[in-house]
Amino acid sequence: MNKISIRNLSLTYSDGIQPLRNISFDIPSNQISVIFGPAGGGKSSLLRTLNRLNDLTDLKNQEGSVLLDGRELLDPSLDVIQLRRQVGMVFARPVVLPLSIEKNVTYGLEVAGETNKDHLSEAVENCLKKAAIWEEVKDRLDDPAIALSGGQQQRICLARVLALEPEVILLDEPTSGLDPISTGKVEESLQDLKRHYTIVLVPHSVQQAARTADQAIFLLQGELIEVNSGELMFTNPEDHQTQDYIQGRFG
């Protein structure tokens, strides 16, 4: 079953740059869909389209359709705040709030009006466990989140998104600044999370794409080159451009 359907999506910024040109593909539920390709190919622009963060950029024109469970996400009348709870995003650089570890996780819930302390405490434990960091921080929840390592901060950011109970998690190179051990922990948590969430990942390397992808989408200069299962994409791609990129001939 598909969670998101993208049809004939094109974007144009005010400076004339067109990061996406007539993109069409589906994102299945409860899988990790990896969007990969060289820099400047439109990966981040596509990711931001899925929760309307492009509304905050100098976007000049947007054509096509993006459906979430059959609902048009590009509808101007859509409640964008509610959408961003439903489709959460974790960025490349972890941005923790100047608050305690616990308050970082509960911040969104409290802003949304949640005051039940038992519910908040339960959410903290559940989300930190899902983000694979509970055992590391359970005895120091009152410590400032900024004191954590980069890899720990990134998992706190993931827990903060999970606290809002999204259906889709977008990740834009979430391990690009992390050491291999922290990267492994994040990747491992994603494999567990896909049982409950639909995950769309822009990886920081072809190797990460190959390790994590259930479905892989290859973008090149704003165009969709190939969509395939992760296994086939990285062992027997259909398009020669995909094979050339995977084998390091360009990019």
Image: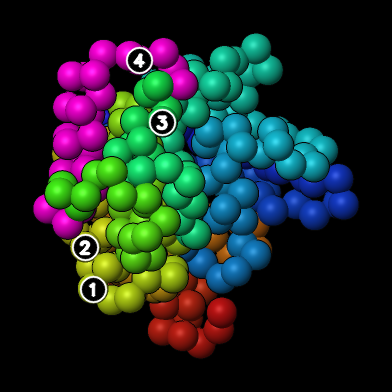
Compared with 87, 69 (above or below) is: above
Q: Amino acid at mark 4?
A: Glu
Mark identifier at residue 162 = none
Mark identifier at residue 114 = 4
Residue 211 image position (x, y, % from top left): 25, 67
Mark identifier at residue 181 = 1
Compared with 92, 241 (above or below) is: below
Cβ–Cβ under 8 Å for marks 2 and 1: yes
Residue numbers of the magenta segment: 111-136
Compared with 186, 27 (above or below) is: above
Compared with 80, 7 (above or below) is: below
Residue, x 42% and y 28% (percent of image)? 108
Circle 2 or circle 3, nearest the eye:
3
Cβ–Cβ under 8 Å for marks 4 and 3: no
Q: State the image quarter where residue 2 is shown.
A: top left
Mark identifier at residue 107 = 3
Gap between marks 2 and 3 measured at Cα: 24 Å
Which residue is identified by label 2?
A: 185
